[in-house]
Image: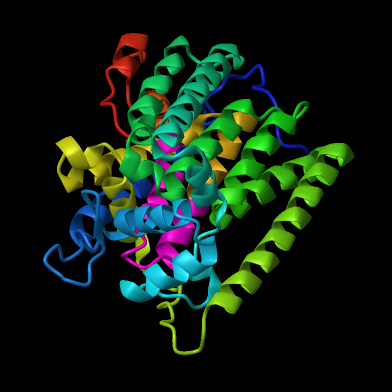
Amino acid sequence: MAQIAKTTPLSGWNRLAGLPRPVAALLIALLAGLMLLGTVEGRKTVNPNLTSPALAKAEGMIGDHALYVKILRKMEAGAPYYDAVAEEHRAYHYPLRPFAAVRLPTLATILSVTGLPAGIVAASLLGLATLLAWRRRLMSEPDIPPYSRFAVLLIAVNLGQLMSGQWVLIHEVVAGALIALALALYRPERPWAAMAAIAAALAIRETVLPVAMLFGLFALIDRDWRALGGWIVLGAAFAIGILLHAAAVTAATDPTDLAGGGWLGLGGWNNYISFVYKTSILRFFAPYWFATILVPLSLLGWLAWRGRLGTAGLLIQLGYAAAFMLFARTDNDYWGMLIAPTLFVGLIFSPAALAALLRSLGVPTKRISSATAASIPVAGK
């Protein structure tokens, strides 16, 4: 069976080097087309009506943040999770059907035991561990340029959300940090640490399942039956947990409860770009059009990174991009937090990727220095 490269081959880390001219021209055209498409379509994300009396408000928070803190306070007062969820969802006209409209109880249960301040500390430590794991991985990854270690800065600005009481309540923020940690820890010969991180992420947000399936596919391709068995066991445990969650939600609801709007938004490329913009540091300092340029460049950088980690990161980014384009509604923008911590890592590699494409087209280019690569705008909160 064919194998996906686990390490960088001697030919170099940049898989875009030496491409045939037609392929390079096609990639350049695609890159320009995606940038133009994002600019032409404009923004479609939905901002809440802050004056609406139906909008949840609590402890200086609004919307989903307020909803989750209200549920947390009820649990701290002794209410069971599903009873608290049903009461607050009904009060603020959140859907309770189908069961997937209700978050898994893991994060709320942990925070109700530790308290929100301790939860913020624990999440901050998770962010620090993720940064240290990425730094170690980038410094030990064979043959990638020395300047790649600056990718840690692009992750750091993203993980700052873990230090906020509002954002720790959002399941995608914690799950996204765990996905980033799993990527840094993942090694085909030692998959167990990454598996533990993905198991924790799955317990918080079921939308992490595609990442677990990807790692399981790698184990199958490698014919690593022990690792494959581990991923299968994890999948079975996840399925049991989802069935129990579905039964609990069904028991706490009735046919008159509000149903969700479905997940076939077909929002296209702009839906994806807007999700990244609203869940990244870009929203604080840059206009929207800036994201339409940086996101395609980030994906190009991931594409250039040869080797198992680069391939895994690329497939995760493209998989979630497709999901955001096809299935997410415009008000599901918080999904972007699943991939924002690692998306802009690709910016580190994009100058060399562009240079390789231009060389294939016969355009003279200067050598990309570490100083040039390090000067890429920091993005991704």
Q: Taking 87 as reference, is 214 left or right?
A: right
Q: Taking 66 as reference, is 8 left or right?
A: right
Above/below status of 297 relative to 75: above
* Rendered-image quadrant of the N terminus: top right
Residue at x 57% of width, y 51% of height: 106
- Where residue 252 appears, as percent x and y from the top left, is 55, 76
Q: Taking 304 as reference, is 55 left or right?
A: left
What secondary structure characterizes most of the magenta part?
Answer: helix
**Residue 290 can be seen, yes or no:** yes
- Where residue 91 appears, as percent x and y from the top left, is 33, 74
Residue at x 52% of width, y 77% of height: 98
The magenta-colored residue range is 319-343
Above/below status of 289 relative to 100: above
How many numbered marks, from 0 up?
Answer: 0
Above/below status of 9 relative to 321: above
Residue at x 18% of width, y 38% of height: 284
Q: Residue furthest right?
A: 225
- Where residue 101 appears, as percent x and y from the top left, is 48, 69
Q: Is residue 321 magenta?
A: yes
Q: Residue furthest left?
A: 51
What's the image's color scheme?
rainbow
Q: Is residue 282 magenta?
A: no
* Rendered-image quadrant of the C terminus: top left
- Where residue 299 appears, as percent x and y from the top left, is 42, 40
**Residue 359 can be seen, yes or no:** no
Q: Residue furthest front?
A: 77
Q: Taking 163 as reference, is 214 left or right?
A: right
Residue sitting nearer the eye, 352 or 284? 284
Residue sitting nearer the eye, 31 or 7? 7
Residue sitting nearer the eye, 201 or 332? 201
Residue at x 40% of width, y 49% of height: 170
